[in-house]
Amino acid sequence: MLRRFGDGILILLVLSMAAAWMLGRVKDQAGAERTPEPAETFVVPDPETGSDDVAGPLLPAPSPYDDQSMVEARRAGPWSSGTGFAIGDNGVWLTARHVALGCDRLGVVNGQDQELVAASLAYVSKRADVAILKTQGGPEPLALDLNEDDLQIGATGFHIGFPQGQPGEVVSRLIGRELMITEGAWRGRENTLAWAEVSRSKGLRGTLGGLSGGPAFDAQGNVIGITIAESLRRGRVITTSSDSIIQALKDAGVKPEGTAIAPLQRNEFGRAANRLRRDLKVIQVVCLPPE
């Protein structure tokens, strides 16, 4: 029997939008709206050349007594969007499965000029909310730290992406593990990490839809998970556990290589997040309508 804690319901953080969307409306000579066409390559601009964690006990291993929550999964549809981030300088990106699965045409958004860049779905996990995208070229990748042995309850998490289709970020603190039970477009049980939201971008209210697939950083500047869901009533943000990403990378034959960004602090987090989006290390992923 499913044990419910609080409302026990999670919401996948994918955002559905109308065609007259934040990229702007592109019109032909007759004034009719048309879909922006993805560019062929991913052009990266030249990059620019402290921790406030609260110590707590070490994160325990997954247990049958972990909190459990349910989520209904839906396939991506036209003009839905999420977030992705670079894990290989040859155009390899991590995102959430529900951001990309079911989408015939994928694009990522060049944050410099809002240009759409063609992307392909290279891998989809069968057991976790993880997917890998491929573009022609990409930025210097982010570093992953997938060792949870020294992760402590109360550690600060930094989530970057495009909530509600706009640049934004969330700061959280680690609560513990949570078993996510998925129904709908696919069924599964996945060990995840639950975080209590502490703060968010100024002016960001309501759902965090669109943040799915974005990186979750530790205070040392390493990616430790993928943001995938939220519980609005409980004020929780859910990320993948390390084992989900490790297995996905192994199955896909991908060996991530990246450099940790500078240590993150809450009072400087907004600037760091903007820099990562500007350098195209964190990008928006869009499901485009069929041609």
Image (cartoon, rainbow, N blue to C red):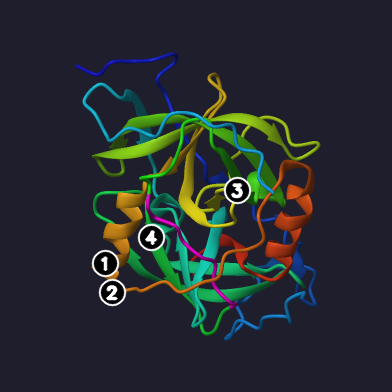
Question: Magenta stretch?
Answer: 139-147
Label placed on residue 268: none
Q: Residues within 10 Å of mark 1 (few under 14, many from 20)?
A: few
Query: Which mark's residue is nearer the viewer, 2 or 4?
Result: 2
Residue 242 vs residue 198: left or right?
left
Q: What amino acid is labelled 1 in the image?
A: Lys
State how far apart marks 2 and 4 are (Cα).
Answer: 13 Å
Determine the secondary structure under disc 1.
helix
Of mark 2 and mark 4, the one earlier in the sequence is 4
Residue 76 vs residue 156: left or right?
left
State how far apart marks 4 and 1 are (Cα).
Answer: 12 Å
- Residue drawn at (30%, 38%), measured in percent from left and top? 191
Q: Residues within 10 Å of mark 2 (few under 14, many from 20)?
A: few
Residue 50 magenta-highlighted:
no
- Residue 244, image x and y in percent? 31, 51
Label placed on residue 253: 2
Q: Are marks 2 and 3 in contact (CB under 8 Å)?
A: no
- Residue identified by numbered label 4: 131
Of mark 2 and mark 3, the one earlier in the sequence is 3
State how far apart marks 3 and 4 are (Cα).
Answer: 25 Å
Q: Are marks 2 and 1 in contact (CB under 8 Å)?
A: yes
Q: What amino acid is labelled 4 in the image?
A: Ala
Query: Which mark's residue is nearer the viewer, 2 or 3?
Result: 3
Would residue 141 be seen by someone viewing this image from the given angle?
Answer: yes
- Residue drawn at (37%, 38%), measured in percent from left and top? 192
Q: Are marks 4 and 1 in contact (CB under 8 Å)?
A: no
Determine the secondary structure under disc 4.
strand
Query: Which mark's residue is nearer the viewer, 3 or 4?
Result: 3
Front residue of 178/150: it is: 150
- Residue identified by numbered label 3: 219
Label placed on residue 250: 1
